[in-house]
Each structure stands twice: as C-alpha cells, then as structure tokens.
Image (spheres, grey):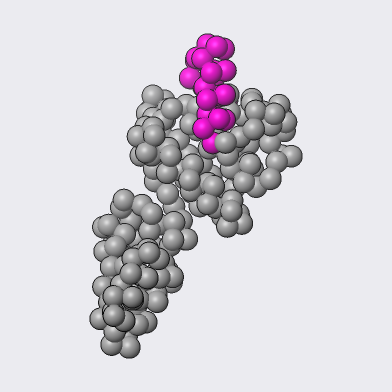
C-alpha cells in the first residue's frame, strides 16, 4: 500500500489543508524526503517542480501562508510533482481563484499531462475546464451518469441541468438556438467552433 501511495498524488481543494511547513521549500521537499531520497535528489526535485509550476525561486524560502491563493496552489501542486507520481487527483484546484489564476493553474495541469505523461483526474464544477479534458465522467450521488468524450457528454444539456450542473456557455447558446429551430451541431463545446457554426448557418 505504501508503494502504491507514491504512484498517486492528491491536491486538495484548499491548499491550506496540505501546506504546513515553515517554508515553501520544506513543503515541496516533504514528499520526496518521505520516499527516502538523498538530499541532492530532493533538492533537484524541489527546484525542478517549483520551476515547472512557475514558482519564483525567491518564494521557496518564504512561508507558504504568506502567498496568494494561486501561489499556494502552485506550491501544493509542486509538492505532488516532486514525488513524480503516475497519477494526480486534483479536487477543485481552481476554486476561489480569479480568471487569471484559474487559467494559470489549468495551463500547469495541461503541461503535467502533455509534458510528463501524468494521468490527471480533475474534479471540477467549472464546465469550461471539464470541456478541456479527454474524458468526462458525470457523477450524481455516487453514481456515474455519463462517461464519454466532452463533446458527447455536454450534448446532453437537459440531463446535465436536471442534476444541477451547467454546460459550457457556448454549448448553452447552441442549445438555445437549436430550441429556436436553428440547425446547429449539439456537440459544440468551444467558442471557435461555435462562431464558425453560427457564421456558416448565416451564410
């Protein structure tokens, strides 16, 4: 079980719940040290992880509780990355962040998947974030209702709304236009695709 735990990392919804050391450096180093790595390897991983999430090296010696919400999340994510897991579970990682902060965190998450090949399990209520995934699983009261590509999942607008979830704004717009008899593809989830489809329909 101990070995398996090192293969999976968890980033809490509120980073304050998992940050506890005196400095950001010590927080990021906590996992690698528990893995029994030597000091040189721990140091390498701390700096590599901090650099990957865009954390200024100057902040490594500061208390994580002096940082902004977005910076705290970067420290929390860096602490997980430093353990080099094969899968990372992120629970509402962009909650309470402004649009810029959400964008930066999502960029980091995408890079983890694309650059490191790490499997990302992202728990979110922001449908625009879910639309960026390769696979979306919709759950209600512990039951899986939908499990498919984002385009397919979000085409079920009425089913999503019935359980209190939204769909991407462009998908909502397309749905409303379809209700008015305009023949648009119900699988549109990106703004660019929405604009293109509407312009073609107007031609």
In the rendered image, the residue lying farthest to the front is 203
Q: Is residue 140 visible?
A: no
Q: Residue at x 48, y 48 (%)?
A: 106
Residue 39 part of the magenta-drawn span:
yes
**Image-quadrant location for residue 28:** top right
- Provide the residue span drawn in magenta: 30-53
The N terminus sits in image quarter: top left
> What's the residue at 52%, 29% (across, down)?
49
- The quarter of the picture where residue 61 lies is top right
Tell me what residue is drawn at x 64 percent, y 32 percent.
Answer: 56
Residue 152 position, x and y percent, is: 26, 64
Query: Where does the image place residue 124, in percent across and percent down from the top left?
Result: 46, 56
* Magenta segment main secondary structure: helix
Q: Position of residue 133 (x, y in %)?
A: 36, 52
- The percent position of residue 87, horizontal first and vertical second, equals 38, 36
Q: Is residue 44 visible?
A: yes
192 shown above or below 201: above
Between 12 and 131, the one lying in front of the other is: 131
């Amino acid at each position: 079980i101990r070995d398996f735990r090192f293969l999976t990392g968890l980033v809490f919804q509120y980073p304050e719940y998992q940050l506890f050391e005196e400095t950001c450096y010590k927080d990021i180093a906590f996992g690698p040290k528990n893995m029994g790595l030597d000091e040189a390897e721990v140091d390498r991983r701390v700096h590599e992880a901090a650099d990957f999430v865009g954390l200024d090296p100057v902040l490594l010696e500061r208390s994580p509780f002096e940082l902004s919400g977005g910076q705290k999340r970067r420290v929390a994510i860096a602490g997980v990355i430093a353990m080099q897991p094969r899968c990372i579970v992120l629970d509402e990682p962009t909650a309470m962040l402004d649009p810029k902060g959400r964008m930066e965190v999502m960029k980091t998450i995408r890079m983890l998947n694309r650059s490191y090949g790490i499997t990302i399990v992202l728990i979110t209520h922001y449908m625009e974030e879910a639309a960026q995934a390769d696979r979306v699983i919709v759950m209600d009261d512990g039951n899986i209702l939908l499990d498919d590509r984002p385009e397919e999942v979000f085409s079920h607008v009425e089913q999503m709304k019935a359980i209190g979830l939204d769909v991407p704004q462009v998908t909502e717009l397309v749905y409303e236009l379809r209700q008015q008899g305009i023949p648009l593809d119900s699988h549109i989830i990106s703004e660019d695709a929405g604009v293109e489809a509407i312009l073609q329909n107007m031609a």
